[in-house]
Amino acid sequence: MLPLASQAGATGSGPGHNRYTLPQQQQPWEANVNLVERAKNLILTPAAEWDKISAETHTVQDLYTGWIMILAAIPALATFVGFSLVGVGAFGLSYRVPVMSGIAHAIASYLLALGSVYVFALVIDALSPTFGGEKNFLQAFKVAAFAPVASWLAGVFHLLPALSILAILGLYSVYLLYVGLPRLMKTPAEKAMPYTAVVIVVGIVISILVGVVSALLLPGRVGAF
């Protein structure tokens, strides 16, 4: 029979209790990935970074709070500052979007951007089996969350309306999607290209719809940007 002290430790009610605590649960975002490092690596070494992402454990919530909600705010805030505070000027004339209208537009475009990521993930996941890939929503959500990074970062050019044309650099996200999609969804090589093409078309349609809805929410703003 074990001594009383040993029994207490074994049952977790005595001095030995701390020895038997469960190991701490690892955070869903493995290795506590740094946001800046992740963005930089996706831009500079996309293939290697997508391979890392594919093996990581994430949840929809942690991707929203630790990544999407932060980066998706860049174009919304930059557009507000650029067009409501800095203003557009040419030939000695200048125009600023009214501040309240600018705030409303920023909020609307931000919320639509957050929602479009989820919709895009649903589309990626739904189409994957058609092209021989796996049906895995969490993997699809990772693609939808990380591929737009270039587009979100390029939104910073809206801070100065004269430079807003440079936001076209965000099209690099199309290449990021092309590199990451077959890796995460396990699409066969011979079907990777058509799968990516279809997803890109859907992504463009979603982006256009988001832009149109965002503009329509503010009468008189269509075409202002």
Image (cartoon, helix red, strand yellow):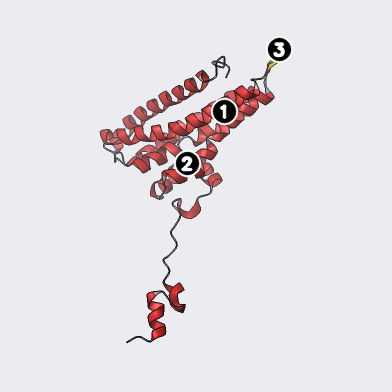
Q: Residue at x 53, y 45 (%)?
A: 35
In front: label 1 or label 3: 1
In the image, residue 142 lies at what x, y percent? 41, 41
In the image, residue 19 lies at what x, y percent? 44, 74
Position of 66 relative to 176 (above/below): below
- Judged from the image, the secondary structure of the residue bearing numbered disc 2 is helix
Determine which residue is flagged by label 3. 91
- Judged from the image, the secondary structure of the residue bearing numbered disc 3 is loop
Q: Quadrant of the C terminus?
A: top right
Look at label 3 and name its amino acid: Phe
In the image, residue 136 lies at what x, y percent? 32, 42
Mark 2–mark 1 Cα distance, whole angstroms, equals 18 Å
> Is residue 188 or residue 155 the one in the foreground?
155
Determine which residue is flagged by label 2. 64
Residue 154 marker: none
Question: Does label 2 or label 1 sit earlier along the sequence?
Answer: 2
